[in-house]
Amino acid sequence: MPKQGGAQSAAPRRIGLLGGTFNPVHVGHLRAALEVAEFMALDELRLVPSARPPHREAPQATAEQRLAMVRLAVAGEPRLAVDDRELRRDRPSFTVDTLESVRGELATDDQLFLLLGWDAFCGLPSWHRWQELLQHCHMLVLQRPDADSEAPEALRDLVAARSVHDPLSLEGPSGQLSFIWQTPLAVSATQIRQLLADGRSARYLVPDAVLTYIQTQGLYPAQTLS
Ligand code: ATP
């Protein structure tokens, strides 16, 4: 009898997700993503650009341009990929919807890891259906080594019940959380937009291909004082 369900007999895959507006993507995102992918031995870490309400797009990069920049940034790096599902929807997605959608494409025992900065993690209780997130993924919370912050009250039970000291020991497809101690590069998209608005260079803060794209598309133009 032929074997069925080839995907089930393969080793579980380890997939990470890093959401953001990526307006524009920069070396802070890329180094953090690559370091987590290497440390966690992920098969793939996907950058997931988020949709923004159309009225907020106007003065800056469009969704297509943000997506194009992320694609250029990860080109040639096999551990990093781009997932554009949130931009293919006609309205901004909730993370729980994205996780459900990704999960639907994976084998049951594949491991899914949602990367969150400490600030995002602390804001979790305001997220839509946040208590369901761990049904679909593990959470990896990126924490600065020098931080000594306590999780907010609303998250203490979750941390007590679900956190695992060693991120490499997260087991199964979903359901646990762990902290990764990582020093972020001091770069933000806000800083890059400001530099460009001031007519200064953003070279070495974004990959050269992204900088060329910004220039050819005329993104983040220098503001002239009137
Ligand atoms: P902005 O300055 O426009 O708010 P940003 O640079 O913070 O943007 P986002 O697109 O909001 O970028 O970030 C996406 C994700 O990347 C978030 O989880 C954020 O915490 C993380 N991130 C942003 N900058 C860095 C950095 N320098 N190092 C590590 N992670 C970062």
Image (cartoon, helix red, strand yellow):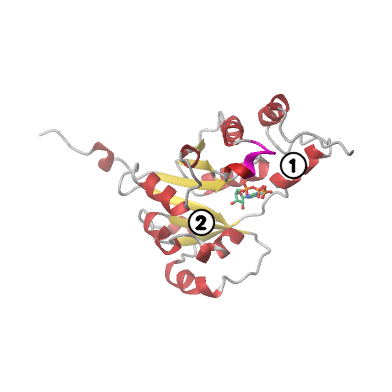
Tell me, yes or no, whether the highlighted magenta stretch contains residue 57: yes
**The one of 63 and 175 positioned closer to us in this rendering:** 63
**Residues in magenta?**
56-61
For the N terminus, the image quarter is: top left
Q: Is residue 156 left or right of residue 31?
A: left
Measure how far apart labels 1 and 2 are at the Cα level: 26 Å
Q: Determine the residue positioned at 46% across, 61% down.
A: 177
Q: Is residue 3 left or right of residue 17?
A: left
Give above or below for 111 relative to 72.
Answer: below
Mark 1 close to ligand 1, CB under 8 Å: yes
Circle 2: residue type: Leu
Relative image position of residue 162 (x, y in whole percent): 43, 67
For the C terminus, the image quarter is: top right
Circle 1: residue type: Ile
Q: Residues within 10 Å of mark 2 (few under 14, many from 20)?
A: many
SS for dot 2: strand
Of the residues under marks 1 and 2, which one precedes in the sequence? 2
Which one is in front in this view, the residue at disc 1 or the one at disc 2? 1
Tell me, yes or no, whether the highlighted magenta stretch contains residue 112: no
Relative image position of residue 175 (x, y in whole percent): 39, 60
SS for dot 1: helix
Mark 2 close to ligand 1, CB under 8 Å: no
Q: Determine the residue positioned at 46% across, 66% down.
A: 163
The residue that mark 1 highlights is: 192
The residue that mark 2 highlights is: 140
Q: Determine the residue positioned at 46% across, 74% down.
A: 157
